Image (spheres, rainbow, N blue to C red):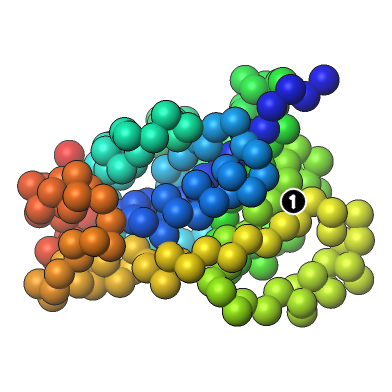
């Protein structure tokens, strides 16, 4: 018997910003999640960036970003695991470790549109429900129609949630740092100071702890 709901927020978090945090908090409230678990990706199989910051750095930024919210926690599960970070492997572990919780995966709409191309997507949909964090005005009708036609049994497991703060992006923050533009108020101050302290995103070189 499931007695709780666990939100799972995955991503590279390079860096984590207010868009991620607002999406997680709104999902927690809207879907009555007992906790949101942030899991920085280890080696992302669907991204071609070769300059992703070291996992330890990204994990530390997450820790600093969520330190004042008792409903948020984080895990080094994917960073510590060898090889590419496939969602299905993570969900198998979480299903085992949180057997009393129903799992909700919080992700952006771009990633949500790709879920049926993920490794072992059919198994993923037996393990979890999806919450797609969308910008206001985002039209999901075409995707939901496709799901209805091609994967009708999955439709009830896909939800959308409007999140105004999603105009903020990690890509833009990295660009701003590289070009000496301000990033204050786009992300938590402890994260901004960490980026400054470790001189992240100043060059294309991969940052290491």
In the image, residue 69 above or below residue 132: above
Which residue does the numbered mark 1 point to in the structure image?
121
The C terminus, quarter of image: top left
User: Which residue is at a point 61% across and 77% down the rendered structure image?
Assistant: 138
Q: Residues within 10 Å of mark 1 (few under 14, many from 20)?
A: some
User: Which residue is at a point 69% across and 51% down the rendered structure image?
Assistant: 130
- 121 vs 155, left or right, is left
> Is residue 128 among the parts visible in the rendering?
yes
Q: Quadrant of residue 185?
A: bottom left
In the image, residue 173 above or below residue 68: below
The N terminus, quarter of image: top right
133 or 58, which lies in front?
133
Residue 166, percent from left and from top: 45, 66
25 or 83, which lies in front?
25
- 159 vs 83, left or right, is right
User: Which residue is at a point 13% across and 49% down the rendered structure image?
Assistant: 193
Residue 80, percent from left and from top: 41, 30
Question: For the residue labelled by badge 1, is the local secondary structure a helix, a strand or a loop?
Answer: helix
In the image, residue 129 above or below residue 139: above
Q: Quadrant of residue 117?
A: bottom right
> Is residue 92 among the parts visible in the rendering?
no
- 92 vs 66, left or right, is right
Q: Quadrant of residue 76?
A: top left
Residue 79, percent from left and from top: 40, 36
């Amino acid at each position: 018997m499931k007695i709780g709901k666990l939100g799972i927020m995955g991503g590279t978090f390079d860096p984590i910003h207010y868009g991620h945090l607002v999406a997680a908090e709104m999902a927690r409230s809207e879907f009555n999640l007992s906790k949101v678990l942030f899991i920085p990706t280890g080696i992302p199989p669907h991204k071609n960036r070769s300059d992703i910051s070291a996992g330890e750095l990204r994990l530390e930024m997450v820790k600093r970003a969520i330190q004042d919210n008792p409903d948020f926690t984080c895990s080094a599960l994917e960073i510590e695991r060898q090889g590419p970070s496939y969602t299905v492997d993570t969900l198998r572990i979480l299903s085992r470790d949180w057997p009393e919780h129903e799992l909700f995966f919080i992700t952006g709409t771009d990633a949500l549109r790709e879920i049926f191309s993920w490794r072992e997507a059919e198994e993923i949909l037996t393990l979890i429900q999806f919450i797609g964090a969308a910008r206001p005005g985002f039209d999901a009708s075409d995707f939901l129609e496709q799901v209805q036609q091609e994967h009708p049994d999955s439709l009830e497991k896909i939800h959308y949630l409007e999140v105004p703060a999603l105009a903020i992006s990690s890509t833009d923050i990295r660009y701003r740092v590289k070009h000496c533009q301000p990033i204050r108020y786009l992300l938590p101050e402890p994260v901004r100071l960490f980026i400054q302290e470790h001189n992240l995103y100043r060059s294309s070189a991969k940052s290491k702890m």
